[in-house]
Amino acid sequence: MTNSNFEDSQTNSVSNNPVYSVGEFSHVIKKLVETNFSYVRIRGEISRPSFPGSGHVYFTLKDADGTIAAIIWKYTIPRLSVKPEEGMEVICTGKITTFAGQSKYQIIVDNMEVAGEGALLKMLEDRRKKLLAEGLFNPEHKKPIPYLPEIIAVITSPSGAVIKDILHRLSDRFPSHVYIWPVAVQGEGSAKQVSNAIDQLNQLSKETNVKRPDLIIVARGGGSLEDLWSFNEEIVVRSVFNSTIPIISAVGHETDTTLIDFVSDLRAPTPTGAAEKSVPVRDELKARVGELGLRIHSSFLSKVNNNKDHLRNLVRLLGKPDQILDNKNQKLDYTFKDLENLFQNIFVDQKNKISQFAQRLLPPKVLINNLDAKKQLLDTRFRNLIENLIDKKQTRFISSGKLLEAASFKRVLDRGFSLVMDSEGNPIKLSSQASNKALVNIKFADETRSAQLDVK
């Protein structure tokens, strides 16, 4: 084959390959990846989780050798047993797909589980430190457990040995009215059910058809860390903290510890122990009441006998009634005599004082005459004062009138002077105040005449 023929064959081979658009090729790659990796499980560490307003969750799943983008659609999130957190090591189950906008592949997560107990313990410790820093575990928030609750609400699984043990123990110790609120105690949605049960029990009141319980027991049997994880969820811890009804936690065995144990008002090592801590023993109470009744009766009899002895001693100390009354009557007579003398002396003294005051007083007629003479004197002085004041004012008025008459401009006119006024009656004092041929009024002593200035 010559070089020319070889080049022609190569050209024909290239020209026979299909030509894809970018979008078409992206679709082919997407179909190829989704077909071959429709179900995968990938283990890695969550990095840079993002929670936008759309409700979806975006993060990167990484390990020492690589990374892969991951997405959790918002309708998948409620089904997850764990919430994505920075640094959490998880196993994600889902399908691999591509995102043409950035030419990358990613996993659409359908399920997520924590990878190993060590990761769970680390997440549990981080959450415990966070809630501890917020003060949710402080002792001052603990509420006292009622001594004898009338109604007890038990939040647990409706089947199994836990609820039977609690009811049996309550019946043996002190039968009480029990509300059973059934919930799932592990698995998907368990934490939400427990939280809702606590919140709704707290909403009961006198206005509702169901009476509010006096105590809540949250219980389940033992299990692994994963089995008990619902009681480590933050939503359950916060519901217990916000509860106004006292809560006893009885989750797992005595060696199991969950976050609900730190925030509850009392922790019981087992569900049976929770029942024992909820109510006293009825037979022991009966015995105690009987013992107290006997002690009260004995104390009462002893008190009555002591009072009788004391009364007898008092009677012996008292004399005969006649002698007591005679002494009191005699003392009363002396006291009455002293009072009589005292009042008589007071009356004599007051009578003498009245006589002395009466001698100092003038007869009313003399007082009236003196006051009448004083009144006449004051009347005379007042009339004289008014007459003098009127005379002075009259003399001053006459003088002012004469002075005004002497200063009147009419007297000036009577002496041959005249007053020149403009048409409005205003005096013209200077010739510059009147223009040529101006009309003026001239006031003489007897009448006013009109004239025109500078007429030739």
Image: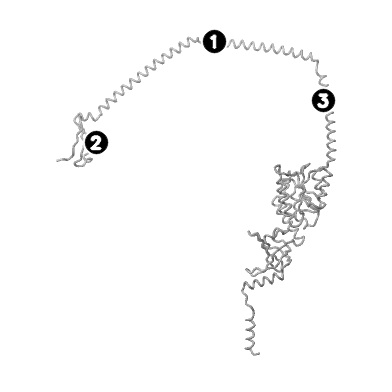
Q: Which residue is mark 1?
A: 358
The foreground one among 16 and 400 is 16
Q: Which residue is mark 2?
A: 427
- Where residue 379 sits: x, y (%)? 40, 15
Q: Secondary structure at mark 3?
A: helix
Which amino acid type corresponds to the residue marked 3 in the rendered image? Answer: Asn
SS of the residue under disc 1:
helix
Q: Residues within 10 Å of mark 1 (few under 14, many from 20)?
A: few
The residue beneath circle 3 is 307
Label 3 to label 2: alpha-carbon separation: 125 Å
Q: Amino acid at mark 1?
A: Ala
Q: Residue at x 64, y 79 (%)?
A: 17
**Type of the residue with mark 2:** Pro
The correct choice, above or below, for 316 with respect to 39 in the image is: above
User: Between tags 2 and 1, which lies in front?
Assistant: 2
- Residue 191, x across and y down, in percent: 73, 54
